[in-house]
Image (cartoon, coloured by chain):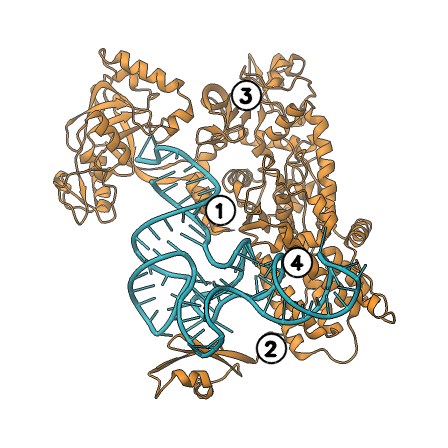
Chain colours: A orange, B cyan
Amino acid sequence: MDNSATRNDPLAPPVIAYDPTAIERKWQRIWQERGTNHTDLHRAQRPFYALMMFPYPSAEGLHVGNLFAFTGNDIYGRFQRLMGHNVFEPLGYDAFGIHSENYALKVGKHPMDLIPKNIANFQRQLESAGLMVDWRYRLSTTDPNYYKWTQWLFLQLLKRGLAYKKQAAVNWCPDCKTVLANEQVIAGLCERSRTPVEQRLLEQWFFRISDYAPRLLENLDHIDWSETTKTAQRNWIGRSEGAELEFETEAPGGKESDIRVFTTRPDTIYGATYLVLAPEHPMVDALTGGREKKSVDEYREKTKRQDLVARKTSTEKSGVFTGSYAINPATEKKIPIWISDYVLMEYGTGAIMGVPGHDQRDFEFATKFELPIVRVVCGEREDANTPLREAFTECESGTLVNSGVFDGFTVESGKKAIVELLARGGAAKPVVHYRLHDWCISRQRYWGPPIPIIYCDKCGTVPVPEKDLPVLLPFIEDFKPDDSGVSPLARHEEWYRVECPKCGGTGRRETDVSDTFLDSAWYFLRYPSVGRDDVPFDPAITKKWLPVNSYIGGNEHAVLHLLYSRFITMVLHDEGHLAFEEPFTRFRAHGHIIREGAKMSKTQGNIVNPDEYIETWGADAFRSYLMFLGPYEQGGDFRDQSISGTRRFLDRLFASVQTMSADGAPDPTVMRKLHQTIRKVGEDIARLSYNTAVAAMMEYMNTLRKGERTPHRDEVLPLIALVSPFAPHLAEELWEQTGGKGSVFDSAWPSYDPALATEDAVELVVQVNGKVRSRIMVARDVTEEAALLAALQDATVSRFVSGTPRKVVFVPGRLLNIVA
RNA sequence: GCGGAAGUGGCGGAAUUGGUAGACGCGCUGGACUUAGGAUCCAGUGGAGCAAUCCGUGGGGGUUCGAGUCCCCCCUUUCGCACCA
């Protein structure tokens, strides 16, 4: 760094140049020595829990996306601290799970060796970024002191009847050789390996999250979360209101043999010309006639073997007739019963009524198999006989036709009336269904917390007593999963062979481990209680610090992690462990960073390594740039060239402090701008609009330097606090240089004078017929008459106005529009 | 197919509620200082035009004194979910 002033004028005092590397190293050391980032959890008067989603410590090291996310949270936390809160900003590692395990397999190392190294690297990188994290409360989900309580959590759910085991068709990834959650299957492919997913039957542990569907949905109305996130959760929970209708069949068994279907359109029952069951439906055998047995069995076998990808990408409907008929309770006509894989056993009752006239899927099915298509709803432009070329699904303006006594009813009233009528005969009841499935937490893998269960021939399924937790994950060499469908732990008899805790007989440990999402579903409860080995979370501390005041993270976790965390919190609330049932009072999703218009990926080789950038530009400039490159909640485009802009800004700030003068009085115009800037930066940070906050400070810096003036001390000093959340090291250095005591973060956010923050002379825009013709300077509280008079004096305006204006629109302090 | 978000200069992006479109930054152009400049500083920078002025926020309509912003119809991009009855 050079400075021409020293060379041009040998008499000028040498000016120290901004050296981020030295400053950052110095302050990171001082912060550590003084415990600047430590929060006294017990004595805090105004607790503020600023949480960010913890990273998975990959071997590649910190991703710039991580840093973007963390910096945004850090700025918010530092700002809250300057606003007088005792801010707790913890961070830890989500180190269990398939990512770590697969990587370990790939490089031929053991995760138990690999993870500590990765964490150490992350730790170094995070510290170089200057986050206000209280590292005394760091946690890792792989620490037995942590997963002991993850296992404890499982036992609590078991105790409440919310954990159960069932044989279920699960998604099996032949590449990862493991079961996947529904959520990990994207369009029939494994989200990680992109391999087509197969179906397998395995004994799995599930959590009854579906019991909580109504509450998970309703509470969304009362929490301060990004609207996009709430919408994603609502869609995921997928409430749909409808009715279950009963159709009598010819199968023996009386009422038992009725088929229940779920529909959201009971109003269309007169148009139900056939029924369809899922191929796995339990009634299929009883309904299959002798002649059809062969084709039905073949079809069931085919759909069973079919992998998900084929099933989900084929648009062509398939199916077979069972040979049986049911009675439509409305028309009392005989209608055929079919089976088809477009009906899913997992949803509703596993059976539907086919209404081809008003459901596109049914229409395709009926067309293919030449089943009757009847119109029972028409809009304003149709009548009962208008032919159907495709399903007519518009229902808001629909009227029922061909529906017996219900002709003329609207869709809405028809729904109610038909269900009421059928309900009298016991053939219908209103029902609400949710798409949300129970949460399968079993993983046939190694790298996770063992599920704390022991199977005993005599006692059955026995939970591991709480006093025996944790069930330690043993170190085994052969942790690679194979396609046997059982966990690698099942190959280690010395580990799984244990005494039954109940009878002392021979027992066998559960050899599956739990889903990583369970680890992360409660970590925010643990942070303030890290160090307490006797409880998962200390009641007093928890009461003081939770729920989380501000949670920031990626929207890729909008459904899974956030939904599971809410569920676990609700369960713990119901169990009496927590006083609240929503863990995150406020949640904001940050955006994602792309680079030069393209997604960052290893294969493209355009990954940003934060280390290099921090080294070249300094952490402060890098942080500021990340926050400046786009709106935080939307993400943005990382462009190497642009970092110089934020660095230049910090250089100028540094230089201003070196050259500022205490002589004379500050410039009133500059001071006015300063107060406006203080207000704007504060408001912008509060709403996470970091890019505009940085822009406002840059703008002020331009004002400060305009015309090569020497800035006055009073004009510069408040800027140190304003910039401190973005550039904490530099702010500390300048704070010290200018005689500040202690840390700038223990000072206060500058206040602004509202009178100064508003201009008293404003530029009034003068329009003629809505087109801007001039701008005139007027007092802020100028009256319409005075403004009009002044405007008409203006040469340009008078050129466009002849005679008396027809109308004048006046927006005080902003605009005058003369309609001529 | 369904749902969400978004289309603004050469580029990243500004514009609380309908009221100055393009803040701020990059880049670019010119200048100053320099042996030099990829450093620093100053000035300029949406398009057309000598100018007055006109045109400009994906396209087409509309409401309004006034529309990037509101309404209707299209187009494009992007991210979720995907036969959920």
> Which mark lies nearer to you, 3 or 2?
3
- Give me the C-alpha separation between circle 3 and circle 2: 67 Å
Front residue of A613 and A780? A613
Who comes first in sequence, dot 4 or dot 2?
4
Chain on which label 3 sits:
A
Q: Secondary structure at mark 4?
A: helix
Tag 2 and tag 1 share a subunit: yes
Residue A275 figure quarter:
top left
- The disc at residue A177 is 3
Q: Secondary structure at mark 2?
A: helix
- Say whether residue A16 is left or right of residue A472: right
Q: Position of residue A156 (x, y in %)?
A: 57, 32
- Mark 4 neighbour class, 10 Å CA radius: few under 14, some 14 to 19, many 20 or more: some
- Give me the C-alpha separation between circle 1 and circle 3: 32 Å
**Residue found 75% across the figure and 58% down from its top:** A730
- Say whether residue A436 is left or right of residue A486: left
- Give me the C-alpha separation between circle 4 and circle 2: 32 Å
- The disc at residue A229 is 1
Q: Which residue is mark 2?
A: A755
Residue A60 seen by the camera: yes
Residue A371 figure quarter:
top left
Report the amino acid beneath label 4: Gly
Who comes first in sequence, dot 1 or dot 4?
1
Tag 1 and tag 3 share a subunit: yes
Vertical placement of residue A77 versus A495, above or below: below
Q: Which residue is mark 4?
A: A645
The quarter of the image holding the C terminus of chain A is bottom left
* Marks 1 and 4 close (CB-CB < 8 Å): no
Q: Position of residue A718 (x, y in %)?
A: 71, 68
